[in-house]
Amino acid sequence: MTSPSMTNSLMDRLILPGAAGFTRFGYAWRKRGWTADNFSMEGRTVIVTGATSGLGLSAARSLAKLGARVVLVGRNPEKGERARQDVIAGSGNEDVSLQLADLGLMSEVRDLAARLLESEKAIHVLVNNAAVLPAERSETDEGLEHTFATDLLSPYLLTELLLPRLKACAPSRIVNVLSGGMYLSGLEVDDLEYENGDFDGSRAYARAKRALMVLTEQWAEELEGSGVVVNAMHPGWADTPGVEDSLPGFYRLMRPLLRSPEQGADTIAWLAAAPSAAETSGRFYLDREPHVTTVLPGTAGTARQRARLRAALEAYADRSAT
């Protein structure tokens, strides 16, 4: 199993060099060592959530170019149809469809999964990309804090509901899109919905991404030998509508250094398609290379915390079914 290189591990643990690697210059530096892509996704079906803009749209376009059947998941019908036409025009592949769902609502996650299982006889790749980063704490119509619901509970529930089909269609893959902000957050099992203390949107986002990394590792262990591999990735700092809207100060300051959406999404498509990416599971990637998952002591969570996280998400999911 491929492990993080000594250079990557050192840079990740040194804050400034590690952050420099998140920029477009970090992407350009690492890309120098890549070989030309010669893989195909012909005959493969890929589900991409949050696919109507930014990283999701770029990843969908790249996967369609490789010949995959791509199912875009988004909330807005007009925006979704524009994205579908964009992917078709940008790839020359017309096998692109759209499914509408608000992934902050577990009832809609369940409806989406049911529709996908009905319409897609084969599912080979699930990309969990949809996420929000609200400035203030708010709750969904189902009474859940928005960041927790969209960024953590939703990918957990959708993955669990689609796992039987992914197993049946193995070899298959799950790609979870995370964030470098995860490095600064521990596992907050006792306050998943950020009900205590002053709400911080960036911290809530980082907490959710840390928990999704833990899920990535848990699923990888549970699915060993099944033909389903599960990996996570960090896109670096990319120039996307989500970053511009959610982090305007950061966006104005860092814009000259930001990656393009295509550069940020490159590792999503690589993890979904490259034969070599199927050789590892439970890893955290940046620019096609595995990186450490923690840089601060205690942020990985104890075995008890990790078990409690899974139990809590199962309980939330069970409640959403009633």
Image (spheres, rainbow, N blue to C red):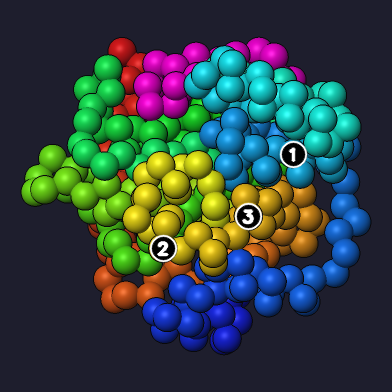
Name the secondary structure under disc 2.
Answer: helix
Name the image quarter holding residue 173. top right
Relative to 244, does residue 14 appear above or below in the rendering? Answer: below
Task: Report, in whole angstroms, how far the alpha carbon at label 2 lies from the one at label 1.
Answer: 29 Å
What residue is shown with label 2? 253
Q: Are marks 2 and 3 in contact (CB under 8 Å)?
A: no
Task: Report, in whole angstroms, how far the alpha carbon at label 3 lies from the one at label 1.
Answer: 14 Å
Image quarter of the N terminus: bottom right
Query: Does the rendering let one see residue 314?
Result: no
| Residue type of the residue flagged with mark 3 | Ser
What residue is shown with label 3? 260
Q: Nearer the viewer, mark 3 or mark 1?
A: 3
Task: Report, in whole angstroms, how far the alpha carbon at label 2 lies from the one at label 3.
Answer: 16 Å
| Residue type of the residue flagged with mark 2 | Leu
Q: Is residue 183 left or right of residue 47?
A: left
Q: Compare marks 3 and 1 and give the one earlier in the sequence.
A: 1
Q: Compare marks 2 and 3 and give the one earlier in the sequence.
A: 2
What residue is shown with label 1? 61
Q: Compare marks 2 and 1 and give the one earlier in the sequence.
A: 1
Pointer 2: residues within 10 angstroms few (<14), some, or many (20+)?
few
